[in-house]
Image (cartoon, rainbow, N blue to C red):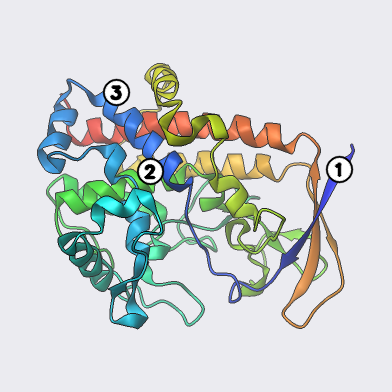
Amino acid sequence: MKKLFITTLLMAATAFPQLSFAWGADGHQSIGAVADNLLAGTKAGAQVKAILGNNTLEKVAVWGDCVKGIAPEKDFAYTSTGRYPECAPFETAAGIAAMADYVKRNNSACNPAFDEETCHKQYHYADVAIQHDQYKTGYVGTSDHDVVQAIRAAALVLQGKEAPKPFSFKDKEEALALLVHYVGDIHQPLHVGSVFLNAEGKVIDPDSGEYDRGSNTVGGNALQCPCGNLHSLWDDVPFNYKRGKMNEALSKKAKTYSVVKAPVEQLPVLWANDAIRDARKLFDGTQFSKSTPNQRGNSWSIALPLEYEKTMSNLKDDALVRAGAHLTQILQAIWPE
């Protein structure tokens, strides 16, 4: 099979922390819009309205990323004013205070290691090796505050219960905004599945034998390409989906999507399993070869099939539909008819 060779740079996880902007604003808002459409006229839709008031799931879907503009090292000041149009509704004095308050409560309670991100950023992902068929607590890349546990915690708050530590969601409005975002995150394959490479550039299973932290490609963030990195390439939605152009089409597909029924706390595990499967597909046919080492780490090349763009488009379309259907599902499970 012919390959398109893209030079990439693999460095230790300490050099490239997980960025975790799954789908960007367009994808997250599309997922929220699908749920808004499918929940119209339902009890869950009425509950969402009661909690959000004049806001919608579509509008608040980006809040989980907007809060990343709060900088703990700058006395929790907001440093992103005007950079992201989707965050503008939250850039009022009250909105910035709310974001800062959330980040303060979810900054360090998970006791992050020296090379790990602040806690609330870790809520957006897991890094499970693609050799596994399913998400399982205890695997390398999972934790008590990864994206699966974050969805569970937000759902508990919406059910009138307390979130387990280290999560601190002050009320249902905050929990709902975060739930919408996390459900979007868990459907981006590289927010759950990850490739681990040894010194020779061979894919390894970190759960078999001794784990080297530097082998984690952190959801593709450590794999550099002309687009920036592989993770960024997968975050972006196809052009025809941008600015809500395909929300109606996505809603129609999501309405007929057959969801797997399970208790609320099991749903994110099932979705994580799907994401691992998708991550395995997105790495199918790729090859890693070693290039010249440099002072910051080992260089690698990743060979991608020529029709990789088609693979991405198909997987993204399916993932966005599933995310909209699953967000609808979990909200209806929390507030059944």
Please tell me which of labels 2 and 1 falls first in the chain. 1
Report which residue position mark 3 lands on.
Answer: 38
How busy is the neighbourhood of tag 1: few (under 14 within 10 Å), some, or many (20 plus)? Answer: some
Badge 3 amino acid? Leu
Q: Nearer the viewer, mark 2 or mark 1?
A: 1
Identify which residue is drawn at 76% across, 83% down.
295
What mark, if any, has residue 183 been given in the picture? 2
143 and 316: which is toward the camera? 316
Badge 2 amino acid? Val
Which x, y percent locates residue 167? 27, 63
Above or below: residue 325 compared with residue 50 = above
Quadrant assignment for the C terminus: top left
How busy is the neighbourhood of tag 3: few (under 14 within 10 Å), some, or many (20 plus)? Answer: some
Which x, y percent locates residue 68? 37, 64
Badge 1 amino acid? Lys
Please tell me which of labels 3 and 1 falls first in the chain. 1
**Residue 10's image quarter?**
bottom right
What mark, if any, has residue 3 been given in the picture? 1
143 and 17: which is toward the camera? 17
Identify which residue is drawn at 20% across, 59% down.
92
